[in-house]
Image (cartoon, rainbow, N blue to C red):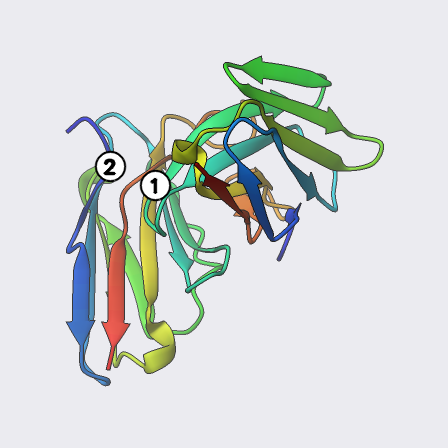
Amino acid sequence: SQQGEEDPQALSIQEGENATMNCSYKTSINNLQWYRQNSGRGLVHLILIRSNEREKHSGRLRVTLDTSKKSSSLLITASRAADTASYFCATPESRGYSTLTFGKGTMLLVSP
Amino acid sequence: GAGVSQSPSNKVTEKGKDVELRCDPISGHTALYWYRQSLGQGLEFLIYFQGNSAPDKSGLPSDRFSAERTGGSVSTLTIQRTQQEDSAVYLCASSLVEQGSSGNTIYFGEGSWLTVV
């Protein structure tokens, strides 16, 4: 079952600009995570935000969570060409908490 | 090893043949996951192992797919009588404890790219 949905599907920006990606989900969660994937290979965990948190920072990353709207956003500030990748949000599977459900991702292209 | 290791990295097989994909999780991780990702798509959950508990096989798309985890460590995903629609990247991941209840991170391998011709 599809839990998280990212928006937009693709985003193209210039180096130095900020990139904002959004994620919506359907059921109650106790945490939400963001992952990054380069070139269709393994995913790398970026940040986890718990349901009792509204905002979290990690370096140039800022994540917000609005449980009333069942949505989250990932902001990458001062983007770099190396940030080019696909970004996925992931939430605990609605049938239980043993797995994560991933959205289809946002493909970010940062041009020099 | 330092991370989740998967083999082979790439596999091209003929339709109808069986394939085995191997995953070596991070040492000490009790939970192991298999996901599938088709081109340009999100991750599709396949199967989950947690310690000595019965695996959650609810994501396996057909009875041609099976997986086992021996000794609570290495896992093998087997696809029998492969079909062209099985072409995808198969991603293995592991985590220290059950994901969700405490929000621990899942660590992914680099994946096995399967092409069925």
A67 vs B46, left or right, is right
**In the picture shown, does residue A16 fall above or below A8?**
above
The chain ID associated with circle 2 is B
Q: Amino acid at mark 1?
A: Ala
In the picture as drawn, the residue positioned furthest to the bottom comes out as B16
Q: Is residue A99 visible?
A: no
Q: Quickly name the residue at label 1.
A: B93
Q: Residue at x 27, y 78 (%)?
A: B82
Q: Name the spot of residue B45 as percent of width and height, x first.
A: 47, 54
Residue B111 % position (x, y)? 28, 50
Residue receiving disc 2: B4
Residue B93 percent across, percent down from the top left: 34, 41
- 10 Å crowding of disc 1: few (<14), some (14-19), many (20+): many
> Which residue is at a point 67% across and 41% down the rendered structure image?
A23
Q: Secondary structure at mark 2?
A: loop
Q: From this viewpoint, is residue A26 visible?
A: yes
